[in-house]
Image (cartoon, rainbow, N blue to C red):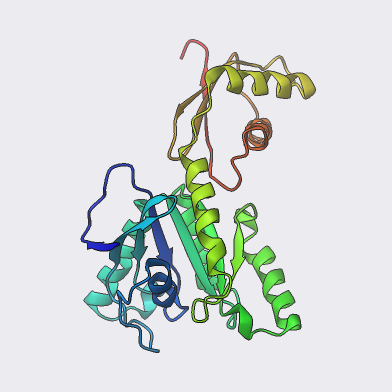
Amino acid sequence: PVEEIEAIKPDGVPRVALVGRPNVGKSTLFNRLVGAERSVVHDMPGTTRDAIDTLVETPEGPLVFIDTAGMRRRSKIDDSTEYYSLVRAVKAIDGADIAMLIIDATVGVTSQDQRLAERIDVAGCPILVVLNKWELLESEDRRSVEADLARMLYFIDDAPVLKLSALTGMGVHKLRPVLQETIEQYHRKIPTRDVNRIIAEAQQKQPAGGGARVLFAVQGSNDPPTFTLFVNRELPQPYIRYLERSIREAFQFGSTPLKMRVRKKGD
């Protein structure tokens, strides 16, 4: 069953925002995911002007899919309707548990795709990259798109990448399992004893130097997972990143953004 909802945020139901430039196939993919023709798609940019929230019951549990209007650069927005569509899309990213960045593989990775990925990254939202219209590419073009992806979106290199066709349905069945796994990582809560065990092992393997140490660590919150390190003195940034990597690998956080907070003893 599919139920259209307006700006409703059901408690505990993960929200998935579909974002991308105009005309990359967001609404076609949205319709395929929700199993209903919820938004009219014409082959012209800017047709879907407002975000549509749709609650979908899946075998793994309910999901809210948010189909946002195609996001253009501000300089190209010349009317207020389009501007508010962009504002709504940015709000959708900020309120989502995961964002699917949909890229038209036949066009390749553009600077606008790069800016959208940066915006999602800043929001602390897990990201899933979808290369749509993949079936239309020859082998050489596919290699070129993969190289551009690695070069332009290097800052989200942990993000899952799915190659599919929203139009034919090729590969779409792989989406929901990846979404569910990513959402589970975003909500994951690690027991304090396990966090401290991993931090202790990491420090033993590679001490921070200068007598700096983490005395105690705790996961204060999730959505995204946030860890607080109580230290005896300032830790260098590279060392904090090392501890973050240790936590990520030990608890299989995948591409989920982690927040690391450092508190000095006595603060």
* Residue 107 point in image, percent of width and height: 58, 82
Q: Nearer the viewer, residue 53 or 35?
A: 35
Residue at 79%, 23% (x, y): give it: 205
Q: How many marks?
A: 0
* Residue 56 point in image, percent of width and height: 34, 59
Q: Is residue 221 left or right of residue 131?
A: left
Quadrant assignment, res 76: bottom left
Viewport quadrant of the N terminus:
bottom left
Q: Nearer the viewer, residue 66 or 145?
A: 66
Quadrant assignment, res 92: bottom left
Residue at 39%, 60% (x, y): give it: 17
* Residue 217 point in image, percent of width and height: 55, 20
Residue at 39%, 75% (x, y): give it: 27
Residue that sits furthest to the right in the current view:
205
Residue that sits furthest to the top in the current view:
266
Residue at 49%, 30% (x, y): give it: 189
Q: Is residue 91 visible?
A: yes
